[in-house]
Amino acid sequence: MPTFCRHGGLIEQCPICRSTILPTPASPARSTRSPAKRPAKPAGSAKRTPARGALRIRQEARAADDGYRCLLVPGLRAEVEARRLARELGFASGRIALLGSDPPGLYGEVAAEPDIEQATWLAFQIVMLSPLEDDAPFASIEAVRTTWSSGEFPDLASARRGPRSPLDAVRWPATLEAYRRWAAASGSQAEAFTGDLGWSPQRRFERVFERLSLPGLGRQGRYDLLVTLGSLGLYELRAPGLLLTDDDTTSRTAKRVFAIGDRLTLERRANALVEECGVLAESLDLALTNWQGGRPITLGVPASTLDAAAETRSIAALGL
């Protein structure tokens, strides 16, 4: 029996309504054939070459856990690591003492130079190039050094640089130009590093450290320069702490030794350690770098330099 739709025609012939009675085409049956297997990877192909900029995880060698524990250095788990830290604190403390009493090489020239501007500029060049770790640590600096009054920059492109040099191989001209502008803005280098006459040595170190943030000059370069100027007696400067602002060797090692990444807590634990060991904060900075690395960095002083009393105090503080 014919059926009429709401449009007055046969439902089978209505282009609108016929879809309501026509069967919906059946979906094609899924193949029951197993999917093709991926070809097996050749042996050794599982290791992928990391893409540029990809995260890299570096495993650092550590001494075997022998049960050593000390609240001052919660990240250390072996007595040999604690003893090495005490030894490096003794060396770093001895180096600062030597710079203040009988500075070797170009450090002695800086301390004896009557012109404060030339003395400061020579100290700046020493830190920027960094003494070499050989029998003539200052030879490269001697070859390219300039005077402040000449306005010339040392030819650092051809100079050998030591392991602590903070200068970038490409950006160093901009860094030296920025340094001269920074000094000129205060009237002179002496005025720039002195700041307010009422500041304490620790306050002066911290404020000048902040102001000396120049292109291409990171934490380590600024810190080393202020430590050098203060240790040689050119300015009253004493570090109030590690002043960890960059991810440099000192910062990374501090995180390992003190078992935390928070900078405020790192500074607090670092200050507690130097107070118990009876050493300066600037001693801990170099000690952490040398504790982490292979061959210790001497920065122009004899490798035999040692503050035996500081090492003894450090050994006692670390419970060894």
Image (cartoon, grey):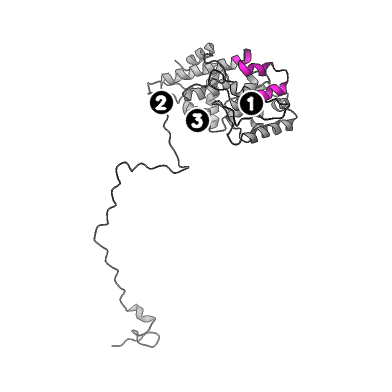
Task: Name the foreground residue: 147 vs 70.
Answer: 147
Q: Are discs 1 and 3 less than 8 Å apart at CB? A: no
Find residue 142 and report its image quarter: top right
Q: Give the distance between the C-alpha atoms of the residues marked 2 and 1, in whole angstroms.
A: 41 Å
Residue 238, compared with residue 263, is above or below; it is above
Left-right relation of 47 to 233: left
Find residue 83 and report its image quarter: top left
Outermost residue on the right side: it is 187
Identify the residue at image location x=50%, y=16%: 314
Residue 221 in magenta? no
Locate residue 33, reporting x and y percent: 24, 60
SS assignment at label 1: helix
Q: Tell me if mark 1 has few (under 14), some (14-19) or many (20+) residues whose alpha carbon lies within 10 angstroms of its own.
A: some
Identify the residue at image location x=48%, y=15%: 315
Please give the label number shown on residue 144.
1
Residue 108, compared with residue 180, is above or below; it is above
Mark earlier in primary sequence (3, 2): 2
Locate residue 159, reporting x and y percent: 59, 28
Locate residue 279, reporting x and y percent: 56, 17
Q: Give the distance between the C-alpha atoms of the residues marked 3 and 2, in whole angstroms.
A: 14 Å
Residue 118 in magenta? yes
Q: Amino acid at mark 1?
A: Val
Magenta span: 98-124
Outermost residue on the top side: it is 309
The residue tagged 3 is: 252
Badge nearest the viewer, 2 or 1: 1
Please give the label number shown on residue 213.
none
Mark earlier in primary sequence (1, 3): 1
